[in-house]
Image (cartoon, helix red, strand yellow):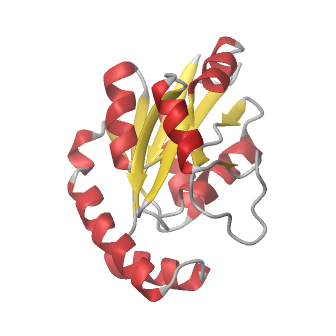
């Protein structure tokens, strides 16, 4: 049972890396986070996120249903515990795609997690990616870039760091960190 945690700023390409990893390995299972943010166009409840109200999320916290949770850009995000534990018992390579605050919580609970910080080639490249994907307002992008600088300053907290200049290069850096597929 292996838990892989991919951490990094919004827009760094964590989702793209996971998509490629899933194409390469049949044992990969991506945890679906719960969030209070509004769904973006084409996002599906239960596929992209579990979209919940703030009161529902706060109840999940009180009931101990989350492995980790944090507030990020004014919304709650968290990892539901039960499905992660179930997939780990099944022998899956469970992937968490999370932000820094949540990663810190996971590391205190699960010390043998494979903790990977995904970093951009530069802040300029990250800004360009956020602009290109077109999912945030200019003020949201600026907020995400400010948070990104703080997140990148914490990169020394992670045993592994991979640079996502291209997905092919990022995957080449990631695969040797993982156990062989059974």
Above or below residue 46? Residue 142 is below
Say whether residue 111 is left or right of residue 54: left
On-image quarter of the N terminus: top right
Q: Position of residue 68 (x, y in %)?
A: 44, 33
Q: Where is 31 relative to 107, above or below? A: below
Residue 155 place in picture, x, y as percent: 26, 50
Q: Is residue 147 left or right of residue 73?
A: left
Residue in view at x 69 percent, y 34 percent: 28
Placement of 144 over or under 9, stated as above or below: below
Q: Quadrant of residue 70?
A: top left
- Nearest the eye: 136 or 92: 136
Tell me: 165 left or right of 94.
left
Residue 36 x %, y %: 56, 53
Q: How many marks?
A: 0
Tell me what residue is drawn at x 49 percent, y 22 percent. Answer: 64
Residue for point 33% across, 65% down: 148
Rendered position, 128 above or below 17:
below
- In front: 7, or 35? 35
Residue occupying the far front of the picture: 55
Q: Farthest residue toward the bottom?
A: 138
* Residue 45 visible here: yes
In the rendered image, the residue lying farthest to the top is 89
In the image, taking residue 85 as reference, residue 9 lies left or right, namely left
Residue drawn where x is 40% and y is 66% of the image:
120
Q: Position of residue 165 (x, y in %)?
A: 47, 68
Q: Quadrant of the C terminus?
A: top right
Q: Quadrant of residue 44?
A: bottom right
């Amino acid at each position: 049972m292996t838990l892989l945690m991919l951490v990094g700023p919004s827009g760094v390409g964590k989702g793209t890396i996971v998509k490629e990893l899933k194409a390469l390995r049949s044992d990969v299972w991506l945890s679906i986070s719960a969030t209070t943010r509004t769904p973006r166009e084409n996002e599906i409840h239960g596929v992209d996120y579990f979209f919940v109200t703030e009161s529902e999320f706060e109840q999940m916290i009180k009931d101990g249903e989350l492995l980790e949770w944090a507030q990020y850009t004014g919304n709650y995000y968290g990892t539901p515990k039960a499905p992660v534990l179930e997939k780990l018992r099944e022998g899956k390579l469970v992937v968490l795609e999370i932000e820094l605050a949540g990663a810190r919580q996971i590391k205190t609970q699960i010390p043998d997690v494979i903790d990977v910080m995904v970093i951009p080639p530069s802040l300029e490249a990250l800004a360009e990616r956020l602009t290109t994907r077109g999912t945030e307002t200019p003020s949201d992008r600026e907020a995400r870039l400010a948070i990104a600088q703080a997140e990148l300053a914490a990169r020394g907290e992670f045993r592994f760091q991979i640079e996502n200049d291209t997905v092919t290069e990022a995957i080449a850096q990631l695969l040797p960190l993982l156990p062989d597929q059974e």
